[in-house]
Amino acid sequence: MYHAQSSCRCVNLSMDQLPTSSQAVFELELEVIEDNQPILDLLADNCAFSRSKIKQMMKQGEVWLQPTKEQSRNKIERRIRRAKATLAAGDVVRVYHNEAVYLTAPPKPTLIADEGIYSVWSKPAGLMSSGTRFGDHCAINRWVEQNLAPQREAHLIHRLDRFATGLIVLAHTKSAAAALSKQFSDRTVSKCYRVIVEGIISDPLRIDSELDGKPSISKLVPTSINQDMQQTTLEVTIETGRKHQIRRHLAGIGHPVLGDRQYGTGEGELTLRSIKLAFDHPQTGNRMAYILDT
């Protein structure tokens, strides 16, 4: 009926053993031999989890399908969530399970504005911008797809670091996603962040230095200084959007963001918050601005 194409990579088990319910992390790859194989049966026969847990694993985005049947138009690997789905010969199913991720309850974002074809949210610390192969239930776009009424698809347009907070926009149609993505690509979106850094920065500063071989520009404006704590609160605007740009730029000039475990001392919460976001409405072209007061 089906067989393990490559043995699963399991924690505390040899490579030729199938996953058990006690495993914390495993990866499993299965190739379907015959048509019309129920995916739930396939998974239940090859890992020692209950059917209800497997359904939840699928819902949370741990199970992936790579169609390889000749008549399949889309051979790109994608998440498969329907427990009643049937598989075709040649399909490959992959499971990426991490028990800690599976048990994580995502923090809830706050809706700032629902504009129909897009929405703006305040993302809390700990909620991811996008999922991983081990699941996407802790990603904001998946949370919004499941909880925003009326229910709509949610396309990620830009990202915030997992432990950063503040404004993020999601598109609810493909055309809106394309229009908003183009604005980010063309650098016509205004983005402003509030950060608290170690040390004293008294004057506005422009940082223009490459990150990962690409131009990167950050502009800093001090808004308050705490001499006793030797800390400065800044408003930072960025003209580019490189990975960890603000954190890397500030650490590079000797003023890491408070709470930055990767580029700074890492004590306490990351004090990086997206507070202003402005762009053109995807349909009307009107300039839309969103501001967080706190």
Image (cartoon, rainbow, N blue to C red):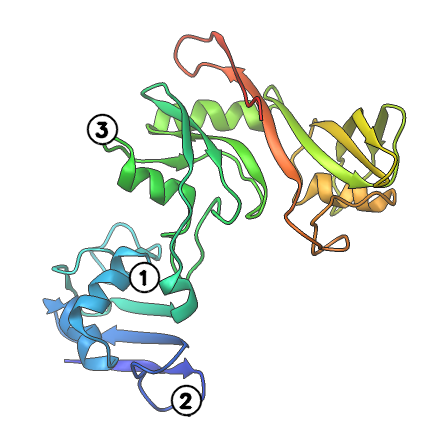
Question: What is the spatial separation of the Cα atoms under label 1 and label 2, in whole angstroms?
Answer: 20 Å
Residue at 34% across, 83% down: 22
Is residue 126 visible to the viewer in this orientation of the structure? yes
Residue at 59% across, 42% down: 164
Q: Amino acid at mark 1?
A: Trp
Q: Which mark is residue 150?
A: 3
Badge 1 marks a residue whose secondary structure is: strand
The residue indicated by pointer 1 is 64
Number of marks present in the image shown: 3
Percent x, y of residue 193: 66, 29
Q: Seen in the image, is 262 located left or right of residue 68?
A: right
Q: Amino acid at mark 3?
A: Pro
Residue at 55% across, 23% down: 292
Q: Seen in the image, is 188 located left or right of residue 203?
A: left
Question: What is the spatial separation of the Cα atoms under label 2 and label 3, in whole angstroms?
Answer: 45 Å
Q: Which mark is residue 15?
A: 2
- Sooner in the amino-acid sequence: mark 1 or mark 2: 2
Q: Amino acid at mark 2?
A: Met
